[in-house]
Each structure stands twice: as C-alpha cells, then as structure tokens.
Image (tube, rainbow, N blue to C red):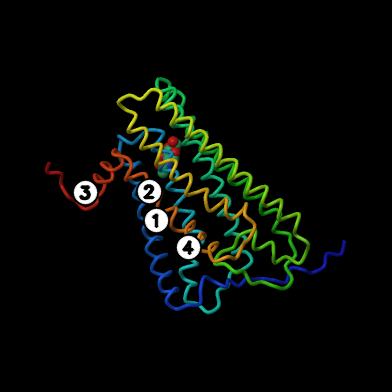
Amino acid sequence: VNRPNHSVVSEFVFLGLSNSWEIQIFLFCFSCLFYISSLTGNLLIVVTVTSDPYLHSPMYFLLANLSVIDLIFCSIAAPKMICDLFRKQKVISFGGCIAQIFFSHAVGGTEMVLLIAMAFDRYVAICKPLHYLTIMSPRMCIFILVGAWTTGLIHSSTQLAFVVNLPFCGPNVLDSFYCDIPRLIKLACTDTHKLESMVTANSGFISLGAFFLLILSYIFLLATLQKHSSGGSSKALSTLSAHITVVVLFFGPLIFFYVCPSPSTPLDKFLAIFDAVLTPFLNPVIYTFRNREMKVATRRVFSLLLGVRKTI
Ligand SMILES: *[C@@H]1O[C@H](CO)[C@@H](O)[C@H](O)[C@H]1NC(C)=O
C-alpha cells in the first residue's frame, strides 16, 4: 500500500492561557507558587513516611506512593507551561506532545487504581480490623503497586495507539497549554468522530466508573462507622473525609474533560491548571492537616531538618 505522506506536522503550537499581561503575571506567580509547594509537600510526605517507623503501615505506604505519583504528575505539564507563559511562540515537538499524553495517562491511570486501593485499605481496616495486617501484608502492598502501574501503562498505551498513527497534515495550533487527546484528535486530517467516542469511552467511562465505585464504597464505610460508633470512629471519620475530598478533587476535572465534550471554554483551561498544579498540592495538605499522626511526624522531620533538638 502506498502510504501517503500525511504526517508533515513536526511540532504543535500552544495558544497558551491568555494574552493579557496582568493575567500572565498572575498565572506565573500562582503556578510557580503551587508547583513548588506541590513538590515540597509531596517530597515531605515521602520523606516523613519512609523515615518514621510509626508510619510504617500499609495506609501510609500507599499515601507515600500517591505522593510519588503526584510528584511525577505535576511535573508533566506545569514546568513547560510556566516557562512558556512569557514566550511569544509556545511550541512543542510532536514527540514531546506524545510524551505528555503518554505520561499523563499512565500516571493518571495509576493514581486511579491507587485511590481504589486506598479505599480497599480503609474497608479492611474498618470492617475487618482483626485481619488488617494479614490481608494488607507487604506482599499485598507490592501486588497493589505493580497492579496499579501495569494498569496505568496499559491504559496509556491503548490510548496512544489510537493517536500515534493519525495523519496530521496542516493545522497544528492547540488552544491549550499542554497536549491532550481530545484536542489533538481534532487536528487530524481525517474523520475522527469514531475515535472521539472511543476516547470518551476509554477515559471518560473508566473515570466515571471508578469515581462512582469509590463514592459508593466511602458511603458504605461511613454508614458502617455510624452503626458501630465507638471511641476510634472520629479519627476514622477524619481519615475517610480526607480520602473523599481527594477523590472528588482528582475525578471532578477529569470527568469534566472527558465526559462533557465542549473543549476550549475558558473554564476548561482554568480547570486544567487546577488539575495540573493545585490537586497535587492539595493532596499532602489534606492528608497532613486531617491526620494527627502525620502532623506529629512532619513536625519531627522538620525539626530534624532544621537541626533543632527536642527540648520538651
Ligand atoms: C510504596 O509502597 C511500597 C509497598 O508497600 C513500600 O515498600 C514503599 O516504601 C512505598 N514507597 C514510598 C515512597 O513510600
């Protein structure tokens, strides 16, 4: 078969976020602040959990792994966005664009599975407390992690398989600041209706399904807690509400992007910034502020880092 030389596009141009100087300065400060805070906050969680023997339990291992994922996730699109803000020509190579899509879906898929695993962990802790350590054994934790990353990589590769071979022949302007599939597909010189519904099915229904699964399991757990309300339940309640907040923050924007098919509204872009820098920043904040053990442990790490001796 004589394959026509369609793919002449070697780079894409981002329109960016705004042309107004004031908004650009604001976005620059906002994104820098939250990007750096995301990095520090998540790094702090990883250091705290790995260095504190009191936190060597499945729940905290999963939390630290979530922080590693957040560290990667916020470094996929945000640094380039921040560097691009004041550039006239915001370009990204074809390969760079594909890489952004690949990593964001791989890491996003992994995070989704990890959030489900964290709900399962809370289910075991609340409903089968006596078997907690046998069910959530180190082997189980490793199994969960391997499963999460495998799922992420498979999801991401299947998404890319649809996109990589599309013919891109002319228009190469993306009204965005990062590459993602729904927008990229619209630039292909072919009929992409089938493909768009495939992407909606793959990303949209998976995230919608996972979201409802998670919300239902947390409602079930809250109901169980209500029934056997005992001394430890207020702590369990605050842990659960932290989990639920993170789940809503993670899935809200995702569902908006993939299920509601109207890209390129300003709201869309601001939600994307929210997803890129604010959500990874909020995870550590929510977990550390809602959890007494984490708070105490973080303080310990801080005083170690600052070389302060404990005097009390
Ligand atoms: C991730 O989870 C595994 C398995 O529980 C654990 O051994 C590892 O320390 C965790 N990673 C981090 C960075 O805490």
Q: Mark 4: which secondary structure?
A: helix
Numbered label attached to residue 38: 1
Label 4 beta carbon less than 8 Å to ligand 1? no
Task: Find disc 2 in the rendering and name its residue.
Answer: 284
Q: Position of residue 298 (x, y in %)?
A: 28, 45
The CA span between labels 1 and 2 is 8 Å
Task: Find disc 3 in the rendering and name its residue.
Answer: 303
Q: Residues within 10 Å of mark 3 (few under 14, many from 20)?
A: few
The CA span between labels 4 and 2 is 18 Å
The CA span between labels 4 and 3 is 30 Å
Left or right of 87 on screen, residue 198: right
Q: Which amino acid, by three-letter code, is at mark 3?
A: Ser
Is there CB contact under 8 Å for labels 4 and 2? no
Position of residue 162 relative to residue 246, above or below, is below
Task: Find disc 4 in the rendering and name its residue.
Answer: 78
N-terminal label among 4 and 2: 4
Residue sitting at x 58%, y 45%: 152
N-terminal label among 1 and 3: 1
Nearest to the observer: residue 191 or residue 301: 191
> Of discs 4 and 3, which sits in the foreground?
4
The CA span between labels 4 and 1 is 11 Å
Q: Which amino acid, by three-letter code, is at mark 2?
A: Pro
